[in-house]
């Protein structure tokens, strides 16, 4: 009695095999039926096959032409336009790929509402369209920091065309966003450049008036006239007409010299700023007019020759395993309940 009690909790694989053999007919029957049904319902008649096309791209470090090609004011060299982007650029590219702008353009260009057989008058047509789009079109970052654009579709040509078009649109979208910002920057720099240019013109006009009054180079003229005055006083006396003429010129220098020096120094500073602004203006103008692709395309998508979905053998296998497991568990439950009821009756 004690021996039987001590071995009740020990798992015996032989008993399990014998138990399964006892119920082999329902187990095998249901498993085979489930596998046959899975094979039937996974056929193209019930589940249209889908073909997969993939585009692999690397993000760029910069799409700015001015930073990549033109000399930089505060840097010894510009950014390398031939360098592949890293994690940050890949994440930014993924965000762009998932943007509403690209999704809506793809939906409109390929008429996906009709292509996916979605009723446009339905109450949740838009939601269903977006969900189907997300199921068929996906993006992922690889371990090599590249980005894959994967498209599934019942038509292999459509899948390839959508994948290639998305790659084109991501560059166009990024360039549009950058050009909008570059245009704002160009407007600001242009306004400041024109303002400082106008200010320089006014100051140059004022200096021209001072030159008409005889102030051409305050320091040099002051030094020369002072020497001439001293020489004239010694040689001809303080009351001579030439002395008076020199003194008159010195009075003019004294009257306008400070203004001249101030205008001249400020004008030199403004011209230095004008050169810097002109450089910024030229760079901003290039960024508005020109553009570079946002990606390096590693491969283009092509129409697939074999379907990628559904995987029929996997569906059949999983259905068979699932049916076998479910049937076995139900048999165990029913048999256990039946035996328990017998014990209670006894």
Image (cartoon, rainbow, N blue to C red):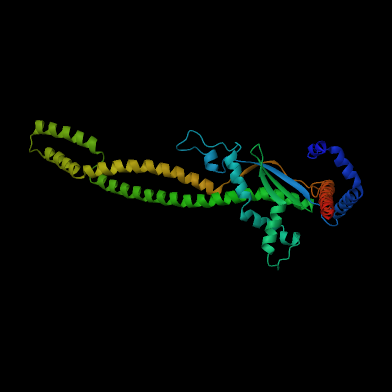
From this viewpoint, is residue 171 visible?
no
Tell me if residue 15 can be seen: yes
Q: In the depicted view, which residue is nearer to us: 101 or 204?
A: 101
Q: Residue furthest bottom?
A: 121
Against 250, residue 30 (above or below) is below
Q: Is residue 205 left or right of residue 222?
A: right
Is 288 situated left or right of 300 in this image?
Answer: left
The location of residue 304, given as percent across then percent down, is 79, 46
Q: Residue at x 62, y 46 (%)?
A: 94
Q: Position of residue 284 (x, y in %)?
A: 49, 46
Residue 274: image x %, image y %?
A: 39, 44
Out of 289 and 106, give the one closest to the viewer: 106
The residue positioned 9% from the left and 38% from the top of the image is: 240
Identify the residue at horizontal 35%, vertical 43% (top origin).
270
Q: Is residue 230 above or below residue 100?
A: above
Residue 287, image x and y in percent?
Answer: 53, 46
Name the residue nearer the viewer: 160 or 64.
160
């Amino acid at each position: 009695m004690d021996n039987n009690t001590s071995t009740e909790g020990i798992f015996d694989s032989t008993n399990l095999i014998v138990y399964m053999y006892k119920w082999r007919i329902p187990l095998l029957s249901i498993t085979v039926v489930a596998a046959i049904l899975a094979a039937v319902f996974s056929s193209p008649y019930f589940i249209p096959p889908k073909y997969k096309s993939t585009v692999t791209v690397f993000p760029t470090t910069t799409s700015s032409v001015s930073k990549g090609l033109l000399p930089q004011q505060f840097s010894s060299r510009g950014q390398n336009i031939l360098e592949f982007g890293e994690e940050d650029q890949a994440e930014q590219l993924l965000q762009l790929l998932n943007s509403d702008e690209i999704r809506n353009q793809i939906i409109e260009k390929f008429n996906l509402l009709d292509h996916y057989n979605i009723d446009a008058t339905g109450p949740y047509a838009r939601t269903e369209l977006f969900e189907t789009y997300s199921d068929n079109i996906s993006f992922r970052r690889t371990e090599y920091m590249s980005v894959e654009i994967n498209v599934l579709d019942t038509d292999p040509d459509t899948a390839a065309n959508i994948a290639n078009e998305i790659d084109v649109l991501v560059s166009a979208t990024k360039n549009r966003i950058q050009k909008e910002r570059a245009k704002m920057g160009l407007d600001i720099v242009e306004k400041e450049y024109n303002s400082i240019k106008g200010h320089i013109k006014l100051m140059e006009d004022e200096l021209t008036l001072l030159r008409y009054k005889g102030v051409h180079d305050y320091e040099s003229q002051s030094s020369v006239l002072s020497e001439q005055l001293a020489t004239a006083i010694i040689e001809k006396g303080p009351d001579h007409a030439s002395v008076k003429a020199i003194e008159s010129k010195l009075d003019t220098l004294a009257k306008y010299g400070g203004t001249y020096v101030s205008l001249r120094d400020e004008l030199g500073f403004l011209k230095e700023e004008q050169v810097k602004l002109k450089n910024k203006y030229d760079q901003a103008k290039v960024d508005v007019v020109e553009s570079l692709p946002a990606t390096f395309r590693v491969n283009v998508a092509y129409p697939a020759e074999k379907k990628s979905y559904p995987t029929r053998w996997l569906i059949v296998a999983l259905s068979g395993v699932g049916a076998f497991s479910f049937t076995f568990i139900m048999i165990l439950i029913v048999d256990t309940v039946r035996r328990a009821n017998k014990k209670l009756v006894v």
